[in-house]
Image (spheres, grey):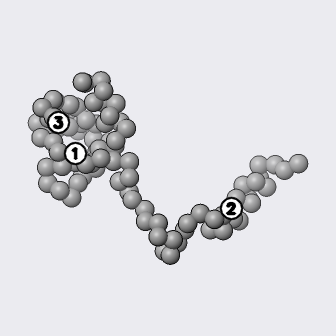
Amino acid sequence: MSDIFDHCFDAYESLGNDGWPSGEDSGYSYNRNFYHTEIDFNLKHETNKAYLITFNEVDFWIPKKICRESKVKGKILVHTSTFNKILGKKL
């Protein structure tokens, strides 16, 4: 009978040899913003913890912790599923 230590040790030893792509030759590239969506917005007000934005002619308070800066001016990256929940409550 195996215990959890043996399983964890086996998993650790198999890192890189488990059939999943890894390394530079794998063709896989990490996307830090995979779960984020870029939106157009109009910033109306800002507090320490949130932005008041206009999106599709509706005002929303968006927590700063779900936002990331976009490289495009006038756009912001928001965590997609959290933003969708906020939209659902407001619409």
Q: Is residue 12 left or right of residue 53?
A: right
**Pointer 2 residue:** 12
The answer for how far apart the CA atoms under marks 3 and 2 are is 46 Å
The residue located at (13%, 40%) in the rendering is: 43
- Contact (CB < 8 A) between labels 3 and 1? yes
The residue located at (11%, 36%) in the rendering is: 44
**Which amino acid type is shown beneath numbered disc 2?**
Tyr
**Which amino acid type is shown beneath numbered disc 3?**
Phe
In the rendering, at what x and y percent does residue 81 appear?
37, 38
Q: In this view, does 78 lie to the left or right of 22?
A: left
The C terminus, quarter of image: top left
The earlier-in-sequence mark between 3 and 2 is 2
The answer for how far apart the CA atoms under marks 2 and 1 are is 40 Å
**Pointer 3 residue:** 55
The residue located at (77%, 49%) in the rendering is: 4
Please determine whether, in this image, residue 18 is positioned above or below residue 39: below
Q: In this view, does 56 lie to the left or right of 37?
A: left
**Pointer 1 residue:** 39
How many discs mark residues in the rendered view?
Answer: 3
In the rendering, at what x and y percent does residue 71 appear?
21, 58
Extreme residue in the bottom direction: 25
In the rendering, at what x and y percent does residue 46 appear?
16, 38
Q: Viewer-nearest of labels 2 and 1?
A: 1
Label 3: which secondary element: strand
Extreme residue in the right direction: 1
Can I make out residue 55 in this image? yes
